[in-house]
Amino acid sequence: MQPQGAFFGPGQTSRRCTDKTEGAQLQLLVSGVLVIRIGIMAPSRAAMSVWLTKVIRLAAQARHNERMAKAPDFKLVLAHPIKPKGGPGVLLVTLEDAVRFIGLMKPWRQARPYWDHCASGLLKAAKTGKRADIVEATRCLEVALRRDNWL
């Protein structure tokens, strides 16, 4: 698995810092191994210092990308399945089913405050994955369906 983001580009396995005047090349591989390729003459201490500073900055960027938030998990199961009477005829089992159900509604219906609140509850449940948030999202979905007389 390759790190992504500012450290490595897509399909890139290493990042090179080259100083043509010194004739040496520094390469940081995916595994974190530092390789110095020497050309005609060895790099000076100043050049090595500059390269190591670049490597440290690149490594800091890679660590920053690792701490990024995880994507919401809409595959989580609702507290219990819901079979609405109206709207697109489906059985709502997962958060993804509920989000898709709301997405297939007419825009004027989606704009109602209880559907907006339901959508934010579904997103919160997908982000946190906590059982309490999933139960609350299921409850909000039932309330919204009852308000539209679909349950």
Image (spheres, rainbow, N blue to C red):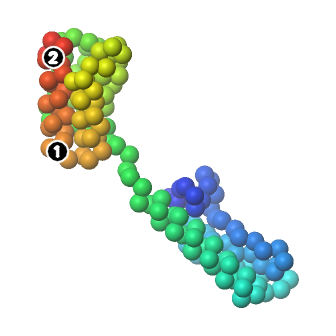
Residue at the spot 41% in from the left edge and 60% down from the top edge: 67
CB-based contact (under 8 Å), mark 2 and mark 1: no
**Residue 82 seen in this snapshot:** no
In the image, residue 55 above or below residue 131: below
Amino acid identity at mark 1: Arg
Q: Which residue is mark 1?
A: 131
Mark nearer the N terminus (2 vs 1): 1
Amino acid type of the residue that numbered disc 2 sits on in the rendered structure: Arg
Which quadrant of the structure image shows residue 46? bottom right
Residues 78 and 68: in front is 68
Q: Is residue 85 left or right of residue 30?
A: left
Instruction: Check disc 2: other Cα within 10 Å, few if <14, some if 14-19, many if 20+.
Output: few
Q: Nearer the viewer, mark 2 or mark 1?
A: 2
Write down the residue under mark 2: 147
Q: Is residue 133 left or right of residue 71?
A: left
Any part of residue 93 in sight: yes
Secondary structure at numbered mark 1: helix
